[in-house]
Each structure stands twice: as structure tokens, then as C-alpha cells.
Amino acid sequence: DQARGHAALVVAALEDAVAALTEAEERLGRLDAVAGDGDHGRGMVRGASAALAAGRACAQDGGGPTAVLTQAGQAWADRAGGTSGVLWGAMLEAAGRCLRDDDEAWRRWEADAPGVVAEAVRAGVDALRSLGRAEPGDKTMLDALEPFHAELAGRDADEGAAAAWARAAERASRAAEDTAALRPRVGRARPLAERSVGSPDPGAVSFALVATAVCARHTA
Ligand code: ADP
Ligand code: MG
Ligand code: MG
């Protein structure tokens, strides 16, 4: 049924995320080592892999997208270690709670899939902001997530979810590269902020990678 189909989509997205992060693990570690502690690649792979395992198990038990995202988020936060893992876990859980699995949610999805996706991303960004307390310009993953959401929300009326997501992922990638000019004002990179100028924020780069990987399968 529909819930199963959408749960499978979420699991597929987690698979894409794990593949992209595994490929980029070393690069993300090097970026984090510029002014942080160098563990971002390792943490993202560990967190996303745990999220995938938990999401798969939940989908096999018949869970819908809300349950899959909630379980995945909890596993990510528990297993990643580090700041970004807790934040990613909270984002997935918040997005999951926003999606819902009931009939009304399916009707809304049928009527306006891109709008529903944009709302779920908004819920994730809000969770990130209330937990991490970072502001735009502080050189964190928020600096890729806010433009990503803005692009999704500002889509053309007749544009499908996949096309809107692809455009948003491109915007997130540019925004992640643009963080190179910034100085970190929160997190572990703050004490060595000057060193980080010229390198993009690892968390912004990994978010853009995940967003790009997740859309590739649906737009190919
Ligand atoms: P840690 O800093 O604990 O070693 P990671 O290296 O995995 O964790 O993640 C670092 C990334 O987390 C940063 O590049 C930044 O994008 C993100 N980050 C850190 N603190 C915050 C925060 N308060 N709000 C949003 N994102 C943050
Ligand atoms: Mg780190
Ligand atoms: Mg660390």
C-alpha cells in the first residue's frame, strides 16, 4: 500500500546517503581537521549506517515513513557520536513527525508532494535551529540547509517534487562551497576559526552531498 511505498522511498534515500558519505568519508574528515577534530566523515558514515539499519528493520516490520524516519533519527543520534549526529538525528525525527502516515496525510501528498516535502524539511531545519542554536552565517550546516529549504519552498507551481529537490540540492552545494569565506562562530571549530577561512564547513558540505545523492536516483 501507500505507506509501504513511501517507507521504501525513505529507506532508498538512506541507502543513497550512506553510499555518498562512505565515498566522501576521507574528504569530510580532512575538512573537519582544518579547524575541528577530524571525525566528521567517520561520524556521518557511522550515524547514517545505523539510521539505514534501523529504518530497514522498521520498514520490514511494516512501519510507514513516519516510523522509519523516527527510528532512523534515533539510531543516527545514538550511534554517530559528535554534534552533527545529534543534530541529524533530531532533523530526521522532526521531519518524520511532520510527514504522518494517515489517510489525510496521503491525500495531501497526492495533491501537493513538493509542498509536503518542503514542510518536512522546514520541520527538520527548525529542529536543527532550536537544538543547535546556530544562526545563519555562523558557518554550520544550517548555511546549506536554509537555502535548500528556501529553494524547495519557492518552487514553480507545476514543478514535481523530484525537480524541485534537484534544484534545491544544487543551491545547497553552492551554499556549502560559499561557507569557505565564513568564520565559525559555534561548535568545535570556533577556537581555530581563522584557520577555517578558505575551507568550507564540513557539516554544510556533507549535507549538500546527501541532498544531491538522494535526488539523483529520482531524477536520473
Ligand atoms: P563534532 O564537532 O562534535 O566533532 P562533527 O565533526 O561530526 O561533530 O560535526 C561538525 C559539524 O557540525 C560542523 O561542521 C557544523 O556543520 C555542525 N555543527 C556544529 N555545531 C553546530 C550547531 N550548534 N548548529 C548547527 N550545526 C552545528
Ligand atoms: Mg568533528
Ligand atoms: Mg568530534
Image (cartoon, rainbow, N blue to C red):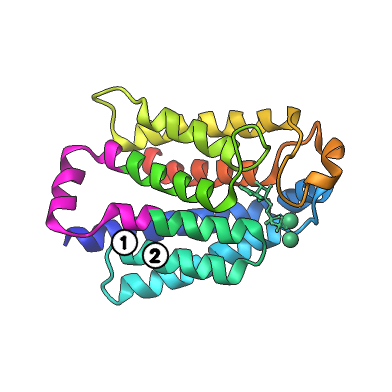
The image position of residue 176, as x and y in percent, is 63, 34
Q: Residue at x 62, y 41 (%)?
A: 204
Does the magenta-highlighted stretch encompass residue 106? yes
Compute the Cα span from label 1 to label 2. 6 Å
Q: Quadrant of ligand 3?
A: bottom right
Residue carrying label 2:
70
For this view, does 181 lie left or right of residue 127?
Answer: right
Q: Tag 2's secondary structure?
A: helix
The image position of residue 189, as x and y in percent, is 78, 47
The image position of residue 131, as x and y in percent, is 54, 53
The quadrant holding residue 153 is: top left
For this view, does 173 lie left or right of residue 189?
Answer: left
Does the magenta-highlighted stretch encompass residue 198? no
Q: Amino acid at mark 2?
A: Thr
Task: Examine the rendering and report whether any part of residue 169 can be seen.
Answer: no
Q: Which residues are magenta?
A: 95-116
Which residue is nearer to you in this view: 196 or 8? 196
Q: Amino acid at mark 1?
A: Thr
Q: Is mark 1 within 8 Å of ligand 1?
A: no
- Residue most toward the top? 156
Q: Tag 1's secondary structure?
A: helix
The image position of residue 182, as x and y in percent, is 73, 31
Residue carrying label 1:
66
14 shown above or below 219: below
Q: Residue at x 52, y 46 (%)?
A: 129
Q: Badge 2 local density, few (<14 within 10 Å), some, or many (20+)?
A: many
134 shown above or below 62: above
The quadrant holding residue 215 is: top left
